[in-house]
Amino acid sequence: MEPILVAENINAGYGDAVIVHDVSVKVNEGEIVAIVGPNGSGKSTLLKSLLGFAKLFRGRVSYQGKDITGIACDRAVSLGIGYVPQTNNIFPNLTISENLDMGAYRTKGKASIKAGMTEIYGMFPELEARKNALAGNLSGGERQMLAIARAMMAQPRVLLLDEPLASLSPKPASAILSKLDKIKGAGVAIVMVEQNVNKALSVSNRGYVLVNGECAMEGDADSLFAEESSRQRFLGLETKGIDTSLPSVHN
């Protein structure tokens, strides 16, 4: 089966600075791919370069077999690629339902929008219970849940998430991971940039480890810690910012 999203030999950064060096990532339909690594390893830069938020010096991006290198974010959304940035990912002065409406801005017809809202509320019942609440009054976990739900209103085939667990305590982080598993079950592929290795890989099919802008390791989530040498390499990165505190990698 041909991957739904492929990034080949990506060199990306900001201004004249190249932060990501020759990194390649592929994403198959209906799977979760984690991109992990310490702070400053280039994870978010790699993700942003796929949609033009970071400078792409060299490389190729394809979606459903078609070259989309250099595509603008709004065009990517119309093709079926959703994106949730780490910050500024909701409208705090709008209600939950209004935020979801904003996510459906490309959907035509009130009936289609209503159907989409019903589907999203079925996946995120916590949001429906507070649909008239201002987004700015939500907790960190609720905000992240809303940001993901808003992106899902556009009915993406691929969802790109930048640090969805950042600054979240264990309980809301686990709730987010549970939602990602449901989204995957609905057939949506997910690319998740995350610093917490164990939590990210616990719901992922495959993973890529970035160190100093290069891919140091890749493989199935189950196999990344299977070899003792691989475990030592991960543990060796702990002092550089990778959290390996959880005993279980993949459920």
Image (cartoon, helix red, strand yellow):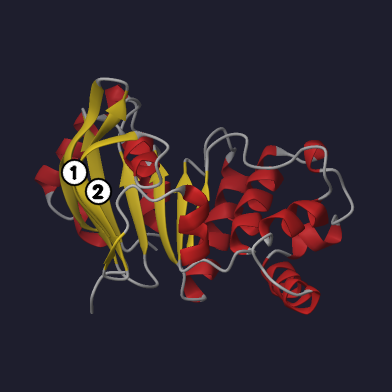
Q: Circle 2 sits in a helix, a strand or a loop, which is it?
A: strand
Circle 2 sits on which residue?
A: 208
Q: Is residue 63 above or below residue 73?
A: below
**Residue found at the far left of this picture:** 229
**Figure check: 242 above or below 148:** above
Residue at 40%, 63% in the rendered image: 251
Q: Residue at x 85, y 43 (%)?
A: 134
- In percent of width and height, residue 237 lies at 24, 30
Label number found at residue 212: none
Q: Position of residue 132 (x, y in %)?
A: 89, 53
For the residues labelled 2 and 1, say whether their Cβ atoms are less than 8 Å apart. Answer: yes
Q: CA distance from mark 2 to mark 1?
A: 10 Å
For residue 151, above or below residue 198: below
SS at badge 1: strand
Give neighbour class at mark 2: few <14, some 14-19, many 20+ (Cα, 10 Å): many
Residue 70 against residue 93 in the figure, above or below: below
Q: Amino acid at mark 2?
A: Tyr
Q: Residue at x 43, y 48 (%)?
A: 199
Q: Is residue 221 visible?
A: no
* Residue type, numbered disc 1: Val
Q: Give left or right: position of 117 versus 25.
A: right
> Observer-nearest residue: 184 or 116?
116
Q: Position of residue 115 (x, y in %)?
A: 74, 77
Residue 87 image-quadrant placement? top right
Label whose residue precedes the other's in the sequence (2 or 1): 1
Q: Is residue 56 left or right of residue 177?
A: left
Q: Is residue 242 left or right of residue 199?
A: left
Tell me the residue that label 1 is attached to: 23
* Quarter in which the N terminus is drawn: bottom left
Judge by depth and name the residue closer to the eye, 189 or 236.
189
Please rate how many residues cluster around mark 1, counting C-alpha atoms within 10 Å: few if below 14, some from 14 to 19, many from 20. Answer: many
Q: Position of residue 109 (x, y in %)?
A: 75, 75
